[in-house]
């Protein structure tokens, strides 16, 4: 019998990141064992866990939803979980937020230990590639980022999009792929998946193809060609790629055909019930796997991160 879900989540006014950057009293970092015990249930019931295992193989996944639905948090948490559960390196490529904002936002979740995972001296397996910051600092960070004293000690790279755009979009993708593989190949342990990669967002990346013409609308064939290029270049290298994508309230991606290329499509959204909004997660597509299209409740808490739990009715 399906249990009714009583937890109500308010929809963020701007984005989930801005809502979750309130300052908390600092807490000690937890061990990997403590983290595993805490996170065992984040993927909901056994049926959902069986389906998500397919994502851990070589594939591409579109995570579509409107602003504030939790797309970026879901993707970063997946990277962190696979690092701490399976030692699989993770790469977060940002086309919308600077590295300082990302660290500030993701630090707000107590169990994530983002700064440790970025730390080269601690053999951190998380890399942030920032394409937003135009003039990255040479050495030290601002005082507000007290957890990181020197960029040279952390896995943070910068790619100047403006420079590469003058050449070609393909040059940009080649630069990104080289950076991802260079990082993933640093770790010599054998693993089927070389790295998990988040391109946040695919909507922003596709918009770059207008090459300065903001009014240009990409034709359907070009959208497919771009996503196929990424998929065909990344999958053979053992890279699992997540594409957060802007979507309307019905879950339809902005360019309307991104989901045809991805092997998996996850919808993160919210719906109104009795004047309140609740967040939910739903699998819409997962080639080669049995899965349910039911909606699952999403909760976001600083103490636990993002959790997918009971079925919505």
Image (tube, rainbow, N blue to C red):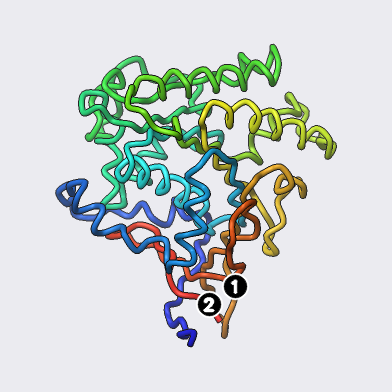
**Residue drawn at x 30%, y 43% as measured from the top left:** 84
**Residue closest to the eye, 61 or 297:** 61
Q: CA distance from mark 2 to mark 1?
A: 10 Å
Dot 1: within a 10 Å radius of its alpha carbon, few (fewer than 14), some, or many (20 or more) residues? Answer: few
- Quarter of the rendering occupied by the C terminus: bottom right
Residue 312: image tag: 2
Horizontal arrangement in the rendering, residue 99 relative to residue 14 (left or right)? left
- Residue 154 image-quadrant placement: top left
In this view, the residue farthest toward the bottom is 1
Residue bearing the label numbered 1:
271
**Residue drawn at x 58%, y 71% as measured from the top left:** 294
Q: Establish if 215 lies above or below 72.
A: above
**Residue drawn at x 63%, y 15% as measured from the top left:** 164
Residue 186: give x, y in percent of width and height: 35, 19
Residue 63 appears in the picture as rendered:
yes
- Residue 90 image-quadrant placement: top left
Callout in the foreground (2, 1): 2
Query: Considering the numbered disc 1 on the image, is that residue within a helix, a strand or a loop?
Result: strand
Residue 55: give x, y in percent of width and height: 52, 48
Q: How many marks?
A: 2
Residue 109: give x, y in percent of width and height: 31, 52
Q: Establish if 254 lies above or below 139.
A: below
Q: Badges 2 and 1: C-beta atoms under 8 Å apart?
A: yes
| Earlier sequence position, callout 2 versus callout 1 | 1
């Amino acid at each position: 019998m399906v249990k009714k879900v009583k937890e109500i989540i308010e929809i963020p006014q701007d984005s989930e990141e801005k809502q979750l950057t309130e300052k908390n009293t600092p807490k000690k970092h937890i061990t990997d064992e403590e983290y595993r015990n805490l996170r065992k249930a984040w993927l909901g019931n056994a049926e959902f866990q069986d389906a998500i295992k397919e994502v851990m193989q070589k594939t591409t996944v579109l995570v579509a939803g409107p602003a504030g639905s939790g797309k970026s948090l879901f993707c970063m948490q997946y990277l962190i979980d696979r690092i701490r559960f399976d030692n699989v390196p993770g790469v977060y490529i940002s086309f919308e937020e600077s590295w300082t904002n990302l660290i500030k936002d993701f630090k707000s979740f107590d169990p994530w230990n983002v700064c440790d995972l970025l730390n080269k001296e601690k053999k951190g397996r998380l890399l942030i590639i920032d394409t937003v910051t135009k003039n990255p600092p040479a050495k030290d960070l601002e005082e507000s980022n007290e957890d990181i004293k020197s960029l040279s000690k952390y896995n943070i790279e910068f790619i100047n999009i403006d420079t590469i755009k003058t050449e070609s979009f393909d040059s940009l993708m080649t630069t990104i792929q080289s950076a991802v593989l260079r990082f993933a190949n640093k770790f010599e342990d054998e693993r089927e998946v070389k790295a998990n990669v988040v391109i946040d967002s695919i909507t922003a990346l596709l918009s770059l193809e207008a090459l300065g013409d903001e009014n240009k609308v990409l034709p359907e064939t070009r959208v497919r060609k771009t996503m196929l290029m990424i998929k065909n270049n990344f999958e053979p290298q053992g890279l699992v790629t997540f594409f957060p994508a802007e979507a309307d309230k019905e879950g339809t991606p902005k360019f309307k055909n991104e989901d045809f290329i991805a092997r998996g499509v996850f919808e993160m959204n919210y719906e109104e019930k009795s004047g309140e909004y609740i967040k939910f997660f739903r699998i819409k597509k997962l080639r080669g796997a049995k899965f349910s299209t039911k909606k699952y409740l999403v909760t976001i808490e600083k103490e636990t991160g993002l959790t997918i739990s009971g079925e919505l009715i």
